[in-house]
Image (cartoon, rainbow, N blue to C red):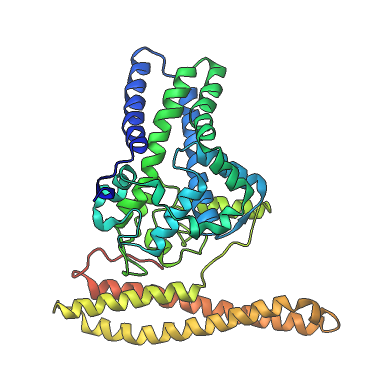
Amino acid sequence: MKSKHYINWVNTLFLIFIPIIAIVGTVVLYSLGLFSWQTVCLAIFLTVMGGLSITAGYHRLFSHKTYKANGFVRLLFILFGAGTFEGPVLEWCTDHRDHHRYTDTPKDPYNFQQGFWYAHIGWLLTLDPKKRNFSNVDDLNRDRMVQLQHRFYLPLSIFMGFAFPMLLASLWGDAWGGLIIAGALRITISQHMTFCINSVCHAFGKQTYSDRNSARDNWFTALFTFGEGYHNFHHKFPLDYRNGIRVYDFDPTKWLIQALASMRFATDLKRVAVHRIIQNRLDMDQKRLSTIDTVSISINEKAKAELQSLYQYISQLLLQRDKLETAYKNLKTSKLDYMQGQAKEYRRLTRMHYQELKVVTSNLKYSMKMWTQLMKQTLLPADSNYESQS
């Protein structure tokens, strides 16, 4: 009974007074004519650095290990991540791994089933740090850099969150602006951007790949969370370094990781196989159709029959593409063996496999476009929110 009414006063006071200081302080500075646009630019820069340190660092690197990064990149993530006041890597990751393992259950730290407000910020107000079990982050406990951040987190977060922006802003004579705008206001905004993933992305959006939990894809949230809004995909495929898988999906974190890889600052980028992604989407669409039948809503029977036929064809294409892709990768791996006297045969096989893979991929893209069109015809007006994910 006692734990039920536990209040984390450190978190509660911080989350109440820092926003008040930020808003009141910003208004006062503006009214006194002390508002500096250089400081605003600094706040934006630190928001981006801190946000990406959480998404690319705390989340996709440390929590899910979707790629590997060198020491310099990891150090930047640890430093600027501390400046957001979202906790040290160890605490952030143990909570997040529990969230994925126990989504929507009482063991989920930010369980959405307890309400939007609880998932957004309420869980922090009642968080009992003594009940944390760090057994799920043994790998991170062996990381010396992570250990040092955990040990010296408080002075490090105070320096990176408040002192550092204050020192930088003092270069143009705006130390107070650095403290209030690039410090308190920026921290408040950064925190609530992250909190929206736990609340908004479990309340609004599409369940494109799975409906086993409340996670949803919300493209609008992705715009201000550095690409984290594609949350249904992430919960289904947490080991993929991407959240927005389409070329036009707004996922700056994905682009940063790709840029780091191109500069050899990051390696071993993990991606889920295309056939798994598409198959999950097809299965969810099939489930929608069966649900509509259950509630006896009139649908286009001809389109439904075409969908069943197209489903079988796409499934065959997915299997064919997977086999060709595997064969092509194996061929690339055995390049040295072929080049020792069979260079001509190797080039012939490579061209043949590449062309076959290209044809199958092209057929798959066309078939998925047809699938999307037929789904829209079949579901509308029963599900006017149906959206293409091809």
Which residue in the rendered view is the most extreme toward the top?
Answer: 32
Q: Position of residue 29 (x, y in %)?
A: 38, 17
**Residue in the picture at 21% in, 70% down:** 380
Location of residue 59 in the rendering, given as x and y in whole percent from the top left corner: 49, 53
Q: Looking at the image, how many numbered discs can be counted on the residues? A: 0
Q: Does the image show residue 223?
A: no
> How far across and down, in percent of the image, does residue 180 sit?
42, 24
Left or right for 3, reference 237: left
On the rendered image, what quadrant is the C terminus found in? Answer: bottom left
Q: Residue 11 occupies which quadrant of the picture?
A: top left
Q: Relative to the observer, which residue lies in front, 180 or 334?
A: 180
Closer to us: 348 or 256:
256
Image quadrant of residue 289?
bottom left
Residue drawn at the location 21% of the way across and 77% of the way down: 291
Residue at horizontal 45 percent and vertical 66 percent from the top: 237
Closer-to-camera residue (20/368): 20
Q: Is residue 285 visible?
A: yes
